[in-house]
Image (cartoon, helix red, strand yellow):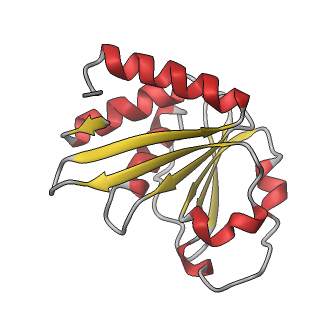
Amino acid sequence: MIKINTIDQMNRFAGILVAFVEPGDLILLEGNLGAGKTTLSQFIGKHLGVKRTINSPTFNIIKSYKGTNMKFHHMDCYRLEDAEEDLGFDEYFNDRALTVVEWSEFITDFLPEDFLRINIEALDATSRAISIEANGKRYDKMKEEVERELLAAGYIE
């Protein structure tokens, strides 16, 4: 289990994660309301060099940003719970950008086969338990590299 105890540690976790992403990668963020999905997304964007304020795209569903070395698509699919509408997801998933999706369970029919899933569980007001699941060879390697760095940083118990 990956244990994050402070907002600063969440920021460092995002930095470690971003060190291993490539254009075209897909990261799914799972967790209950308030678990920290949007906070992690904001830190990911910051580490990608996004200068604009990153906030939850709940009402827009998808927001795109320009980072230093790659674009960043941030999706919040919470409002799509009972929708069957394809909002052109393929266009985003096939773009040379990092795409982060919150509430991906509401668009499972539109997701590519390969992705990295990060599950965030709130333990208390500041502490989070995080687990990483990889689907596909590219993401197996990414998960291994990220977990090696997290272990060295003392985040894995």
On the image, the x and y values in percent for residue 105 come to 59, 67
Residue 152 picture location, percent across and down: 32, 13
Please state, as top left, top right, bottom left or bottom right, where the C terminus lies in the image: top left
82 or 24, which is in the foreground? 82
Q: Residue at x 72, y 40 (%)?
A: 97
Of 140 and 6, nearer the camera is: 140
Q: Is residue 25 visible?
A: yes
Determine the residue located farthest toward the left in the rendered image: 125
Residue 83, x across and y down, in percent: 69, 84
- Residue at 42% x, 35% y is 14
| Residue under the point 41% across and 17% down | 149
Question: What is the quadrant of residue 135 in the picture?
Answer: top right
Q: Is residue 19 visible?
A: no
Q: Quadrant of the N terminus?
A: top left
Judged left or right of residue 95, residue 133 is left
How many numbered discs?
0
Q: Residue furthest bottom?
A: 82
The percent coordinates of residue 70 (x first, y second) are 68, 33
Residue at the location (47% across, 64% down)? Answer: 56
| Residue 87 vertical position relative to residue 119 in the rendered view, above or below | below
Tell me which corner region of the image, top left, top right, bottom left or bottom right, holds residue 143: top right
- 114 left or right, relative to 39: right
